[in-house]
Amino acid sequence: MLLKMEFWLAVTVVFIIEGWQQCNGFRSTHQHHRPHIVFIMADDLGWNDIGFHGSNQIPTPNIDALAYSGIILNQYYVTAICTPSRSALMTGKHPVHTGMQHTVLFGAEPRGLPLTEKLLPEYLKELGYATHIVGKWHLGSYRKEFTPTYRGFDSHLGYWTGHHDYNDHTAVESPYWGLDMRRGLEPAWDLHGQYSTDIFTKEAVRLIRTHNTSKPLFLYLAHAAVHSGNPYNPLPAPDEVVAKFSAITDYNRRRFAGVLHKLDESVGKVMGALHEAGMLQNCVIVFTTDNGGPAAGFNINAASNWPLRGVKNTLWEGGVRGAGLLWSPLIARPGRVSTQLFHITDWLPTLYAAAGGDVGYLGEIDGINAWRALSEDLPSNRTSVLHNIDDIYGNAALTMGDWKIVKGSTYSGAWDGWYGPSGRGESLVYEPYQVMTSQAGRALARAGTTLTPSIIQTLRNQAEVICDSASLYTHAGRNGCKPLTAPCLFNIRNDPCEQTNLADVYPEILQLLEMSINEINATVVPPSNLAWDPRADPRFWDHTWTNFGDYSILNNAVSR
């Protein structure tokens, strides 16, 4: 009898303690059974650059294998450019609410993602995760407190600014030029001459292989690919890889194919490492771009968003509708194309929920927990997406339900058209068996996923966006959308290529969306962009980009 009383007393004490912890916001670090999370972000990958959206031009069998055996996110939105998307991912807040909404953060700017913001790795660390970032940061580095290892990550091998050369690892932000490759805070000069995609892949594989699997892993692999490098070598890829794409006649697109091939190869190697480590059985994997592709020479690049309109840093679908997927054995209904509306801010609460966290603890964020909706194919709680409000550019765009409003434009409308290549044609053939026998395909098969040519083709057909191509080469499309003159309105479900402006047909809907933008604009935090600080010049710091705000320059000498 006494033993029974002691047992129930112990149970009661446990319940009291757990209740006290929850009431006081205490986060348990008990990590048993929490899934490993691997988040792979491509840089500047276009909608039409991956095979599962219908292009036959550049095979991406490893990425495609993940897509077909997981969930293809076909109504998935990112922001139009690098820094805003990464800030949204890390905070779960729209960039307009953190001051990160206008263009990118440059290496010479004395600012960063506000230190008042709590980031995804910090939340996951409270749940017992080991947290590592490999690759691109781009959220501030002028003081060490803004760099990754001070913001929740246990380690970082990669670079701080927005791009670098894939071989010499220097970043040109004219007139400045310096090395941007780091291990933590230390410059990684020894990696000179090694290809960035290979460096990041090897580090990711190393972290997976050496990880103690009794503890959950959060690995954020943020590739440089397929962002252009420096102007003297904008699309760096090994010549022997580029040679595989001799059928692509456009020189820049051929080099782009080489860069993308190495990215896809990286995904396969990461999947292989996860399988070998026995981690796929309890893992959540995300693959996403950060923004739409820079097509037709934009940013000295050769991506494709076909048949979507616009490019990177525009608010057309080609700039903000992202290529993305979610894979996990924890998904109840995998192997499908999702049409649920999903925004990049949703990743933080969604992954936190998948990790067993209480999303109520996240406070006031813009992201929505979509884990159950995606896993079980239920209706999403998200009904609208703010693409951006930028009063400096003078543009804004919002999607509500089936309707999208576009106000203003970037680059005076010079990139408001449709840009190929389409990647379709009789001479181009898609090979399902290449997907099935890829390194990722083999790893997934060993983990219990079954893919067949029939399944692949069915899902690929469902994921492809098909529009009337007759007006895709006219600058304004039908009904003359000129957003610099007047707002445009599109039924984005029926017209994903934004060809038919319905502003004059449905003025009441246009007015409703304009009112919604104005209401949101009342909550906007002013952009935090600052003038470049000459102290950032890499010449002062042994020709490296550094955390210049932690130092001072006196009489042409550098002192701490």
Image (cartoon, grey):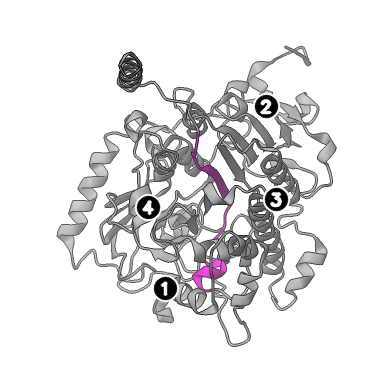
The residues tagged by marks 2 and 3 sit, at their Cα atoms, a distance apart of 20 Å
Compared to 39, does 261 lie above or below?
Answer: below
Residue 342's disc number: 4
Residue that appears at 55% across and 34% down = 139
- What's the amino acid at mark 4? Phe
Q: Left or right of 194: which side holds 306?
A: left
Task: Determine whether the residue tagged by mark 3 lies in a helix, strand or loop.
Answer: loop
Q: Nearer the viewer, mark 2 or mark 4?
A: 4
**Could you tell which of marks 3 and 1 lies nearer the N-terminus?**
3
Closer to us: 371 or 115:
371
Estimate the x, y position of residue 405 in percent, counting from the top left.
29, 56
Q: Quadrant of residue 443?
A: bottom right
Tell me the quarter of the image containing the N terminus. Answer: top left
Q: Are marks 2 and 4 in contact (CB under 8 Å)?
A: no
**Could you tell which of marks 1 and 4 lies nearer the N-terminus?**
4
**Could you tell which of marks 3 and 4 lies nearer the N-terminus?**
3
* Residue that carries the numbered disc 1 in the rendered image: 462
Tell me the quarter of the image containing the C terminus. Answer: top right
Estimate the x, y position of residue 470 in percent, counting from the top left.
41, 82
Q: Magenta part of the protein: which range?
A: 32-54
Residue that appears at 27% across and 40% down = 520
Task: Determine whether the residue tagged by mark 1 lies in a helix, strand or loop.
Answer: helix
Estimate the x, y position of residue 68 in percent, counting from the top left.
50, 66
Any part of residue 230 in sight: no
* Residue that carries the numbered disc 3 in the rendered image: 229
* Residue that carries the numbered disc 2 in the rendered image: 536
Q: Left or right of 438: which side holds 89?
A: left
